[in-house]
Image (spheres, rainbow, N blue to C red):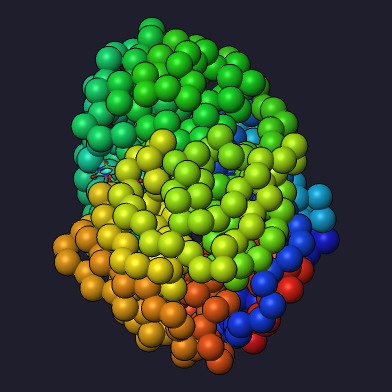
Amino acid sequence: MSSNGARSFAIAPGARIKVAPGAPLQGTVDVPGAKNSVLKLMAACLMADGNYVLSNVPDIEDVVTMSELLSSIGLVIEHHRDTQELHITNNGNLQLFAPYELVERIRASVNVLGPLLGRFGEVRIALPGGDDFGSRPIDMHLRGLTELGAQFEMRHGDIYARAERLHGTNITLDFPSVGATENLLTAAVFAKGSTSIENAAREPEIGDLCNMLVAMGADIEGIGSSTLVVHGVERNALRAVHHTVVADRVQAATYIAAAAITAGEVVVRGAIAGHMEMLLTRFTDMGVVLVEQHDGLLVIGPERLKSIDVVTLPYPGIATDYKPLVVAMLSVAEGVGIVTENLYPGRFRYVDELQRLGANIRTDGHHAVVRGEAKLSGAPVRAPDIRAGAALVVAGLVAEGETIISDVHHIDRGYDDLVGRLCTLGANITRL
Ligand code: UD1
């Protein structure tokens, strides 16, 4: 992968972030493109030959890793950081293989399965392992693809998938899995006949993928709903396109949380309120004032946040990815909040780190009881994953003294210059 206008990424494993309390955050911050969209759009470039341009691409490590994976398959990828674009060429000369050393680094690598199987009728992909928040099986992906006519065989840790030509069918997902919906959708684009996917995930990033596929020539109905109907096209019927990546609702939520916790006043430019309605309602319940503007959201934090109870659910519910931010906010809110995790039972590991900052949190199974403290106190902590890392930064904005966050490479996977953006809002934060 070549890069132009590069901001060099200091991803030394030893990189740390130092943060201390300062004045309430003030100013305007731009929301970058969504990690959970761009990685899938990149995989969709396997589906037709030609020259693609993806715009509003976030400068994050996961884009670099996904580029390595797709380059190893045969795409030619240039990352133009100065214009936030990826220029991707698919010359049709692809290796239908995704190796373990790349698959294990990035969950979204599993998204090559649908495009390659649908278009070429075969693919070999290393079975992804678990990750920082537990076991992440792909049984729903494989079951749905089997219903479309694929056959699978496991050998030496790799999945060998085959199908002469997939055929349309009716699939009902047990659970609205984001990844399974995406793989079934992309595979069904090339199936013979029509496929309906019931109980499909409805996340805005899936809508973004559908919109790109439609621009490429796919025939998809029900975009944004829980029933997607895909009318299959011929394997050579799609064309390369120029597509703009949707704004990242989790990065947007991070700047809203940072503004709110510091009693700041910030415009989060590019935030799409319609993509985070439930979360914004709950932030309002916590005392945050949110005003929708033509180009984003004005956020005004209260003197002190109020506690609420929160339950994570598939979209349009409150996303599991927001949860560490909410727990960080509850740590200093007035009262007691109960947070229930319904997607990843093991996803409370960062609580230990927040406790090091003085947070009063008790976990029991998939519940966390957070008793708001008047003050947190800065300490060295470790970022256990992307979202939890960002939540520790947000907590550090109000923890007395210095908070030093290590394992920052997790944050770099999904945040485009978190430190720089918080600096422009006046935060007392540096990357070491
Ligand atoms: C995506 C997001 C992730 C987000 C998650 C839920 C990307 C790269 N990641 O992950 O940030 O937290 O959606 O919003 O977009 N499951 C199964 N079998 C399957 C598939 C999923 O049991 O075949 C389970 C998972 O283990 C998990 C739950 O279903 O407990 C949700 O998974 P899913 O919606 O598929 O999330 P991902 O696509 O992996």
Reply above or below: 246 against 107: above
Q: Nearer the viewer, residue 130 or 377?
A: 377
Q: Position of residue 20 (x, y in %)?
A: 60, 85
Residue at the image position 28 percent from the left and 60 percent from the top: 338
Task: Answer with left or right where residue 301 lies relative to residue 354.
Answer: right
Q: Nearer the viewer, residue 307 or 325?
A: 307
Residue at the image position 21 percent from the left and 59 percent from the top: 366
- Residue at the limit of the structure toward the left, as seen here: 365
Q: Position of residue 269 (x, y in %)?
A: 72, 49
The image quadrant where one finds the C terminus is: bottom right
Q: Nearer the viewer, residue 294 or 173?
A: 294
The image quadrant where one finds the N terminus is: bottom right
Reply above or below: 351 against 80: below
Residue at the image position 70 percent from the left and 58 percent from the top: 266
Tally of numbered tags: 0
Q: Position of residue 421 (x, y in %)?
A: 70, 66
Residue at the image position 43 percent from the left and 68 percent from the top: 333
Task: Answer with left or right where residue 99 lies relative to residue 163.
Answer: right
- Residue at the limit of the structure toward the top, as seen here: 193
Residue 61 visible in the shown view: no
Reply above or below: 236 against 113: above
Task: Answer with left or right where residue 377 lies relative to residue 150.
Answer: right
Q: Position of residue 108 (x, y in %)?
A: 45, 48
Q: Nearer the viewer, residue 300 or 387?
A: 300
Reply above or below: 286 against 219: below
